[in-house]
Amino acid sequence: MHKKLTTAVSLTAVALATAAFLHGCGGSNGGPANAAGAAVDLQNCCTAGDKDFPKVGGNLGNQNYSALAQIGKQNVANLGGAWTNRIEGGLNTGTNQSTTVVVDGVIYIESALGNVIAVDGKTGATKWKWTTPYGVITRRGVAVAKDLGLVYTVANGNRLVALNKDTGAVAWIKQYPTDATDPNYLGAVQKVAIVYHNRRLHVGTNDGNRGAAFAADATNGNVLNYFWGIPRQGERGYETWGGAEEAKRTGATPWIHPAVDPELNLVYWTFGNVRGGSSQDGSERPGQNLFSNSIVALELTTGAYKWHFQSVHHDIWDMDNVMSPVLADVQIEGRERKVVIYGSKTGMYYILDRKDGSAPLGIEERPVKQDARQATWPTQPYPKQGGFTELCVVQQPLGTEVPGDPNRAVPNYQTGCLFDPHWDIPILSMPGHGGGANWNHQSFSRSTGLVYTGMGYVGAAHSLSESSNGLRPPGSYVTGAVVAVDPSTNLVRWKKQMPYSLAHGNGILTTASNLLFIGQPDGNLLAMEAENGRELWRFQTGASISASPVTYQIDGEQYVAVYAGGTSIPYSDAPRGDHLWAFKVGGTVAPAPAPIPPQVRRPVSGNPVEGAALPTPNTVILGRIPTATNAPGAVESGAVNAVTPTWMRVPANTTVTFTNPADNTGVHCATQFFEGRFNFRLAPGQSAQHTFDKPGEYFYNDCYSPRSTGKVVVY
């Protein structure tokens, strides 16, 4: 599992040790911050710099914290734009998941087109631009080796690119194997932000295959060692896959950058979910399925395995906790403990001793519901303190509408809790795979001693028939929260409901002045009090923010910067752009015009159709997929788009007819949610009518299959 790429090494399978969990409590703020103007020490995991923000995550411990305090509660309301740079000349499309880094006052950012741009952090002027000849690729942040004078990015074709830090000239390009049948193939080099430390690069791959996390020589890109997320025969963990064939042992990829602790000589990688066949079907891969859904500690210098912790055994829900681990030093039972904070799509933080993977605050293996068809694992790990969000769907009567209620169950689904098994019938559970926390960057404040995360509220319905990783029901609210947790106790200190999901790239920055910065999908950058979440300031950047804010100092003046570009998850209609912003107290650049904000309810399939223009005017046909002419299909269906039309527009005071065709075999429903305006249950051949007297957006679904969802928009 850890070896030279060119050397074949057979490792004897060994029994997997179970970590001994320790129980304790306590906490501290992790020690004093650096003096003003200091640079982050990249030979130490957790010192807080302020002059620069030299890597994604701020420091090697991914604390996203700065000791700068010039911008504080007393003057944050006076923040204004220092400058803005449309780095691609005004691009309003694409996928932007890259976070800025700042070294010696220069900002480095990757664009949706696959280019790298260096920008003067004081003036906003572009210093240089590397235009990739290899095409568009999604990335999450460059690495900068100041001592080598290089900036690293990735490009299509499994290329690692090293650029001159000051000019953008190509220093070298290393291309790794691209053919999965090549014995030296490691996977697709993409997305994951690169981490630089001590003349080494830590790089992750993600393409649904075995998922290698590898270290490369920062002077030439040569692979030094690697670790597979999924073992092969003779490797540690192979036996945890039962008798699964090799084709079913895929996935477990490292989707996001690791944390590094040079003092302990360890690097911490998180590995994702199984992808072989369907991620929802565990029937042909019995066992725990290591190292999916795990954090793995490797020796920094050799890549050798040291310990692991698996947060979800035998995952059938796509609940992989693939986010960057955060390192912190906290007081537990009167002594300092070096911990790693891991999690969490599951809505739970797993706080582990980063030396050995033990759990100083306690983690219990609790029995969970079983389904032999899924080969479910009998227990799942729960922190003794519970989660930072709800772990079950809330059932509420129709008509008791609370707009944006984060836990409300969409009607007609069978509902459950985290880890409830499924088979052919969709089971709606909370948090879904798009909720809890996800690949957003978290922050540990050395000032407050709290760890902060954005999160999403969106349930998911899991079943074998879901084509990917579970259905986020159309019509459900997709909102979120900011949560503050004390890692010395693993208890929530405060939680603030937010209008949008903040689980996908919406990173948090905290500062020594107890400010918290986070960007939203509607383009607003917010500043909050880190002690309680109270909003102090907001600024419209012009496009959705799916990156972390950063802060830095030039000529004694503090700046905050953020890249507003946008991505399609979880909102496909999130506004896009190429806005690189910097802010300072007294800045005079005005906010951008507000873009159209994303819809906070999951959309239905299809496009709007005027009710009067339908083959049968103002009529909905249940259980049938619409044809290209908006006529009902000939076959009864329970698909997500089995409503004709899925999206109807009518003027106020229009009467709409809902019909279950006579040649359907089953009872079909039109259940309006969440206002409860109507709930028709119709046998084959029956119809019912409702008059829409008020403008609005009215979602409904079908008891025959709750996936089948439509809406009527009344104007």
Image (tube, helix red, strand yellow):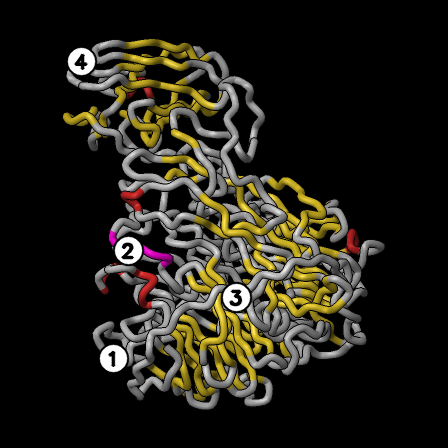
Please, what is the three-letter code of the amino acid marked with disc 3?
A: Ile
Residue 215, given in percent of the width and then of the height, sits at 44, 81
Q: Secondary structure at mark 2?
A: loop
Structural distance between the alpha carbons of marks 2 and 1: 24 Å
Quadrant location of residue 414?
Answer: top left
Residue 285 is marked as 2
Please, what is the three-letter code of the amino acid marked with disc 4?
A: Ala
Residue 623, given in percent of the width and then of the height, sits at 25, 24
Closer-to-camera residue (559/316): 316
Structural distance between the alpha carbons of marks 4 and 1: 59 Å
Please, what is the three-letter code of the amino acid marked with disc 1?
A: Pro
**Sequence order check, earlier mark of 4 and 3:** 3
Q: Which residue is mark 3?
A: 87
Q: Residue at x 44, y 83 (%)?
A: 216
Q: Secondary structure at mark 3?
A: loop
**Sequence order check, earlier mark of 3 and 1:** 3
Part of the protein shown in magenta? 284-288
Q: Which residue is mark 4?
A: 662
Q: Which residue is mark 1?
A: 183
**Sequence order check, earlier mark of 4 and 1:** 1
Q: Secondary structure at mark 4?
A: loop
Q: Residue at x 20, y 24 (%)?
A: 632
Please, what is the three-letter code of the amino acid marked with disc 2?
A: Arg
* Callout 2 touching callout 4 (CB < 8 Å): no
Residue 707, given in percent of the width and then of the height, sits at 33, 32
Closer-to-camera residue (75/706): 706
**Sequence order check, earlier mark of 2 and 4:** 2
96 on left or right of 67: left
In the rendered structure, does residue 105 fall within the stretch colored magenta?
no
**Sequence order check, earlier mark of 3 and 2:** 3
